[in-house]
Image: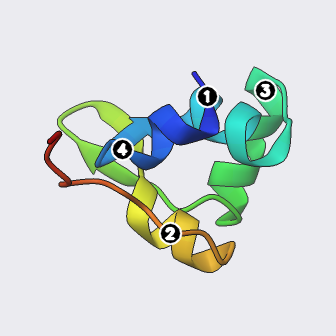
Amino acid sequence: MTLDEALKRATISVPDAGKVFFGLARGASYDAAKSGDIPTIKIGGRLVVPVVPLAEKLGLRSRAGERAA
């Protein structure tokens, strides 16, 4: 997943968020999520990262919800 692809989605997986936004490996991504450095929400039994709050935290602009022309 690229940064551009991530910014177009509402949520992404913890490993994808860690890799795309911080260059972290899978384990380090979950450690960062556990410590609160990567914001997460739980949907059912799945832990996901909401892209908008993370992008804002990093000074990036999310394109989630935009429609293709």
- Asked if residue 42 lies left or right of residue 23, the reply is left
> Which mark is nearer the camera, 3 or 1?
1
Total tally of numbered discs in the picture: 4
Farthest residue, direction front: 69
Q: Residue at x 63, y 28 (%)?
A: 15
Circles 2 and 3: CB atoms closer than 8 Å: no
Image quarter of the N terminus: top right
SS of the residue under disc 3: helix
Image coords of residue 36 (percent x, y): 64, 66
Q: Amino acid at mark 1?
A: Thr
Q: Residue at x 54, y 40 (%)?
A: 4
Q: CA distance from mark 3 to mark 4?
A: 25 Å
SS of the residue under disc 4: loop
The residue identified by callout 3 is: 27
Circles 3 and 1: CB atoms closer than 8 Å: no
Q: CA distance from mark 3 to mark 1?
A: 19 Å
For marks 2 and 3 on the same chain, the one whose residue lies earlier in the sequence? 3
**Quadrant of res 60:** bottom right
Disc number placed over residue 2 in the picture, else none: 1
Q: CA distance from mark 4 to mark 2?
A: 10 Å
Q: Amino acid at mark 4?
A: Lys
Image quarter of the C terminus: top left
Q: Amino acid at mark 2?
A: Arg
**66 relative to 9, above or below:** below
SS of the residue under disc 1: loop
**Quadrant of res 65:** bottom left
Disc number placed over residue 61 in the picture, else none: 2
